[in-house]
Image: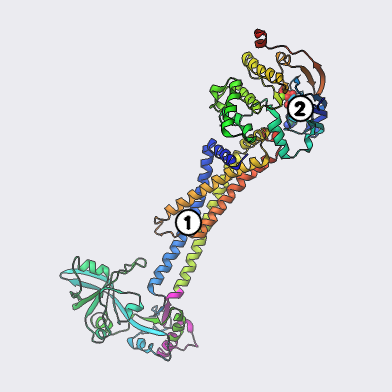
Amino acid sequence: MSFFEVVRFALRGLSANKLRSALTMLGILIGVAAVILLVAVGNGSAKAISDRIEALGTNTITVMSSGGGGGGSSTAKLTPEIADALIDPTLAPDVASVSPVVSSSATLTYEGTDHDVTSFVGTTAGWFTASNTPVGTGAGFTADDEAQARRVVVIGQTVAEELFPGVDPIDKQVTVSGALFTVVGVLKEKSSTGFQDSNDTAVAPLSAVREVLTGYGSINSILVEATDPGKVDAVQSEVTTILNQQLKVDATSGSTSTPYRIQNASQLLETQTETADTFTTLLGAVAAISLLVGGIGITNIMLVTVTERTREIGIRKALGAPRRVILTQFLIEATLLSVLGGALGVAAALIGSSFTIVGVKPVIVPSSVGLALGVSIAIGLFFGGLPASRAARLRPIDALRYE
Amino acid sequence: MSKPVLDVRELRKIYGTGEATVHALRGVSLTVERGDYVAIMGSSGSGKSTLMNILGALDVPTSGQYLLDGVDVSRLADRQLALARNRLIGFIFQAFNLIPRTSAVANVELPLAYAGVKPKERRRRAMAALDVVGLADRAKHEPNQLSGGQQQRVAVARALVTEPALLLADEPTGNLDSRSTDDVLEVFDQLSLAGRTIVIITHETEVGDRAKRLIRLVDGSIVLDRRQAPVLSAAGRHSL
Ligand SMILES: Nc1ncnc2c1ncn2[C@@H]1O[C@H](COP(=O)(O)OP(=O)(O)OP(=O)(O)O)[C@@H](O)[C@H]1O
Ligand SMILES: [Mg+2]
């Protein structure tokens, strides 16, 4: 009997039991699709987190005053002078740029239209590159603008849309807290990093913002850019040394309560990625359980039909089928079911992954496809093949009497 | 004289253990020559089916020897056993044993498929066999769409389709009316005339009368083994 004939027998066997075949395939399909999709969702959310953090710039650190103000430790007053002190080729050779930042909310007015921005930023010209916030149309302000305290402003996309619908905002004048600012550029659209609209912002020279809005008190933060993403940690220790000098902090005593705080984007990225990895593992475990449950379902269906199939095997043996032919037929049946079910599961997962699931765009992990397919095919082969091989070994009369 | 087709010596079959032990066969010895037509009769539970299953190489005896065409069956490997069941023996079960959800013609084709016959030829011969038992018009029906008697005739067709040298039938007419019984017995008479060996189990004396030899089984032992002149079939008598 040729192999081709055995395949035809297997196909006939499958079509003779359509409901059973369909249920088995459905079980495998759901198991495989669940594993691939859940892992993809986990992976997608991890990717989204790291993308957001990378958008902040991984080669920068941010110095802030420790804010709390509670306890005994004093809160440092960050000033532009401290920022200037950080530009020191000998003490801090890895610092590429330093941008002092002040920020406050403000109301922008243009021809009677008001718009409140949550963060009106005052900084220096280097901030645009350091903070990974490129200018889209027009230009950023220059170091000269900052030195002269010229009232120029670069606005975000949201501000441009609100104040200048259908109008080119460049060279228009907006009123901020009684002072006129000239719009010189519009920021490139930025993907939002969470709940805040990062396009609802305006950036102006530090000197001008202090003059008009915030006054000459302390500044909010200092953005320090490293020459290279790998030098971030070096920059952090250099900056710490200078700050301790400037703020007269005794590095040897209570180091737990420094009056300033340093946020390191790459550290943030690391912890966030770890969290995301845990999340992915968790989802993977849930998925593995669903694959297991699917597998038990398949096993159940296969076992329920074992009595009937065993009798059938008895008949076939009595009619002169050798053990090998019977085994081949039943293995092909099991393989077809699990491979077809698995392939449909992968297809379902691929289709499903093109949709956004609970706010996450799933990103398929190739190894999860292989794993899910492998496990489902193994389950199908094992539980399809095992009863068949047992029955094929029985004497025909015992197989016929099986109950 | 060539060696007998069937040669069993001191066959014993014991089912179960301890309290529930059943001695289904208690030392049966029997030889059947080529071309013989043997009817085995006996009350229910006397071990007829047990003997037949062993003769059909579907079961093995607890002790005793079975030579099929001079070959000791207990020494055959799975492949050779399969070959013997397929080429040499046509077996008709008491309980039909058709494959469910599979058409009558596909059921009849099955032994031919395992014999490696090409699909076209297979279909032709299966249809011819169904025609012999008068079921050509039911070829596409599945077992659960056939009456008991029709299922039995499909089982007969399946046993005949390979033209086996040895036909073993376990109550092949148990579910048939007198007309269908006559049709099937007519087929057996033809096969016997063509020189094939037939062993048939039956409860009906008119079926037993058609055979050349009658064996009576009581409680797992042969109590009667008699040659007889076969009674001609009704159809045969009319044609004379
Ligand atoms: N698998 C089995 N396990 C235990 N006992 C069995 C088994 N098969 C048959 N028997 C017993 O062996 C004895 C002979 O059974 P067998 O089927 O050969 O009877 P039979 O002559 O064919 O009867 P019937 O005319 O009713 O078909 C019976 O007493 C039966 O109970
Ligand atoms: Mg019986």
Q: Quadrant of residue A201?
A: bottom left
Residue drawn 15% across and 69% down? A112
Residue ID for mark 1: A38
Residue B11 in picture, x, y percent from top left: 82, 29
Q: Which residues are magenta?
A: A239-267
At label 1, the amino acid type is Leu
Q: Identify which residue is drawn at 49% across, 85% down.
A: A254
Picture quarter with the C terminus of chain A: top right
Can residue A286 be seen here?
no
User: Is residue A268 within the magenta segment?
Assistant: no
Image-based side of A92 in relation to A375, left or right = left
Examine the image and state in which quarter residue A186 appears: bottom left
Please indicate whether residue A116 sits to the left or right of residue A254 in the image.
Answer: left
Q: Is residue A94 above or below residue A40?
A: below
> Can you name the residue that lies furthest to the left here?
A111
Q: Quadrant of the N terminus of chain A?
A: top right
Q: Nearer the viewer, residue B38 or A401?
A: B38
Determine the quadrant in which ligand 1 lies. Answer: top right
Between A315 and A190, the residue placed more toward the observer is A315
Given the image, on which type of amino acid does mark 2 rest? Answer: Leu
The chain letter for the residue carrying disc 2 is B
Nearer to the camera, B133 or A159: B133
Mark 1, other Cα within 10 Å: few <14 / some 14–19 / many ≥20: many
Q: Position of residue A364 (x, y in %)?
A: 46, 59
Q: According to the image, label 2 marks what residue? A: B51
- Is A276 drawn above or below residue B109 in the view shown? below
Residue B63 location (% of width, % of height): 82, 33
Q: Tell me the element at label 1.
A: helix
Q: CA distance from mark 2 to mark 1?
A: 60 Å
Determine the chain carrying the residue at label 1: A
